[in-house]
Image (cartoon, grey):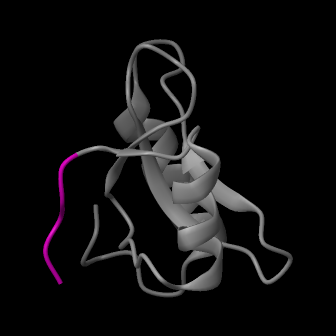
Amino acid sequence: MRYTKTVDLWDGNTAHMVRTGQLKLQAGQWVKCGQEKPSRFVKIEDSGVIVAAHPQDGSTHKRFKTLCKIYLKSVGDVV
């Protein structure tokens, strides 16, 4: 699966497409979540909650790696 340009999850239609599987994202995909700087998509919970690593203390990558360890079974391919 290939990464696409940054996906705007603040757009209700786009977020709905992600939650329903019409738009598939892979862990590591850059997404916009209402902030100026992009976040990195991690996964969608069974409840429909979208998990993403947001820019925090200047280290989105560090936060992304931490969330992958928490939420994903196989981390090696995405970090």
Looking at the image, is 1 positioned above or below residue 32? below
Residue 70 location in percent, x, y?
A: 65, 66
Q: Nearer the viewer, residue 24 or 29?
A: 24
Residue 57 location in percent, x, y?
A: 51, 12
Instruction: Find the residue positioned furthest to the left.
Output: 2
Q: Nearer the viewer, residue 11 or 79?
A: 11
Residue 18 location in percent, x, y?
A: 54, 70
Looking at the image, is 16 positioned above or below residue 38? below
Residue 61 belongs to the span the image colors magenta: no
Q: Nearer the viewer, residue 26 or 73?
A: 26
- Which segment did they paint magenta? 1-5
Q: Quadrant of residue 13?
A: bottom right
Query: Residue placed at 40% from the left, 79% from the top?
Result: 24
Q: Quadrant of residue 50?
A: bottom right
Query: Residue placed at 27% from the left, 44% from the top?
Result: 6
Instruction: Find the residue positioned furthest to the right.
Output: 47
Query: Residue placed at 64% from the left, 57% from the top?
Result: 51
Q: Quadrant of residue 43?
A: bottom right
Compared across the picture, whether 48 is left or right of 25 comes to right
Looking at the image, is 19 positioned above or below residue 36? below
